[in-house]
Image (cartoon, rainbow, N blue to C red):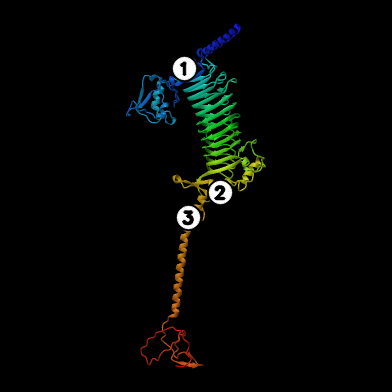
Amino acid sequence: MGAAKFVLGSAILGLFWSCLLMKGVLTNSTNRCDYSPCSCDHYGRLTCDCKEEGEYVAVPTEEKCCVQRKIAVFVEGSRSRARTPAFPAESRQSFIVAPQIFSRKAIIIRSWSGELGKKKHEGKCRDILLIITMRDKGKRCKELILSTESDRKLSPHTSRIVVSNCSSVIVANSSLTSMAGLRSVDLVNVANLSLVRHSFKLSPRSARTRISVRNCSIDVLPSFVFGGDVEAISFENVRIGQLSAFAFANLFHTDTLRLENCQIESTEAQSFKKFDVGYLHVIGGSFGEQVPSRTMNDIEVHHKFMLDGVKMGMVRSEAFIVRSPRTVAIQNCLIDGLESEAFDVTARGAVIIKNNTFGSLAVGAFLGIRADPETRPPPASSSSANLHDLIFKNNSMSTFEEGSLMFDRSSFRPELDDLLVKQPCDCQMLPLWRNNVLNYTNVYSRFYMRQNAVMPPILSSQDSIETPETFLFCVDGHAEDATTASFTDYEARHCSLGGSMLVLILVIVGILATLLILACLIVWCCKRRRRNDRKRWMSVPTNAPDVVSKKNGVIGRETATSGTPVDSRITMVVPDGRLYRETEFHVIVEKAEPLTTEL
């Protein structure tokens, strides 16, 4: 019993002394913790905050200067010299102060124009910068170097690294490989972050580590900068001048890769190369003027692949090659153009493409999005219940051609809604646009034959979801007064016979034609009546034959001896002129029979 107590006491004492020894290693060893601006605690957490020694900022001139103290700058003649800064709030962080003027609390500038810290205003701020650079001539900015070499090396017992508010930070090659207990690396507010090959390569014995970079500027993200069992990688508000090939590679069991509001100026092919990740999210930011082929090459995503609010230039064919995500979301993006099969994605679930603005769409821009072969329904199955949903909603496009909106109907059940053609509505172009969106049977078959796949399924009228009456829109009007109108509404108002303007014109033409016909009828009736009146009413003849002869019991007219012509249309009995000197003739047209007896 006494021996057991002795062994147990020895074990407890050994653990106690080992803890003290570890504490001494972390606190008393000569490493990065012993030098400003870094410090360590008893748990191996390394914290470097450059703000305590001065504010490090980037200088918009060729000469780089260090800021040892923040000094306010005011314009002479301002209303409140003590409180009114000379620069806007967003520009104060870019002001440079020389070490020789530490004792002064403020600098009074007699003249100032433009914003300091922006290259396009360097000429306007030359007087201010001249004072600073002359007084700090020959000085160089301090650089914080994270390395396992030299007298300021990182301790292998470091569990966490936090670096913030520094002007220049260099993470050396394999600087993290000796830290078996490293849990996280956070780099925040670094004006110039320099990374080299294997900067974030982890120890093969380390547990899962999280790497976070926020509000930093990286000129070049080199190849193979990551390596090992990284739990999560997060880049937020980071400017990356060049994203090199294999920058994101050699990752194992990574749960999340998140790029949020990152401005990537140039991207090389295979920047994301052959690794598996649970969630791959790119939110906001930009990918530069061109996204080359195989930018993301053979990336296996277990859960969700998302592009949200990303601005991209021309996306080349097979720029995104992603395998097996359960959900694919491409939303709120601004894309200048998509080439054929720009997205080569094999999905195991629904695909959502919504709220995007596309400049130009080539033939088969989305045809590369297919179902994973393991989850694809058999070809003989004609039911759409086994197909995944593909939602294409509230998108706009400027230029496209026949087959630009083809989808793999053997894998998905497309649902199209609110598709805007960003061109002015044109009665002649509407049928062509409708045909390019809906009628692409020949192009669809050609793509399948080229890929040696089965022929596309033939959909019945019940399976057809796309109806131009519900989802095709164009721009109605110009400039600020422009609105959107569906194809059918625009055709009904401007292109078809039932249009209101055309109906009004037809009504006016009909009224004018009716009035013209009525006028012609009135003129014709008047002329006819006048002609009939002339036949009925005639002047009384002045000469009438006085000789009446009986011939076969009928009174007839004989030609006068004077040779005067006799009007044969009217036969009138005239009294003898010797008896009546003045006679009034009243002609009454009556139906009368010829006299058969002599008077």
Question: Tag 1: Cα neighbours inside 10 Å, few (<14), some, or many (≥20)?
Answer: few
Left or right, 343 with reference to 99: right
Q: Amino acid at mark 3?
A: Ser
Do tag 3 and tag 1 residues touch (Cβ < 8 Å)?
A: no
Do tag 2 and tag 3 residues touch (Cβ < 8 Å)?
A: no
Distance between the alpha carbons at the discs numbered 2 and 1: 70 Å
Read off the residue under disc 2. 432
Distance between the alpha carbons at the discs numbered 2 and 3: 24 Å
Where's the N terminus, which quadrant? top right
Up/down of 403 relative to 323, above or below: below
Tell me if I can see residue 485 in this picture.
Answer: yes
Instruction: State the image coordinates of residue 425 (x, y, percent, origin top left).
Output: 50, 48
| Badge 2 or badge 3: first in the primary sequence | 2
Read off the residue under disc 3. 500
Query: Residue drawn at (45%, 76%), measured in percent from left and top?
Result: 531
The secondary structure type at the circle numbered 1 is loop
Left or right, 247 with reference to 108: right
Distance between the alpha carbons at the discs numbered 3 and 1: 81 Å
Instruction: State the image coordinates of residue 301 (x, y, percent, origin top left).
Output: 59, 31
Read off the residue under disc 1. 36
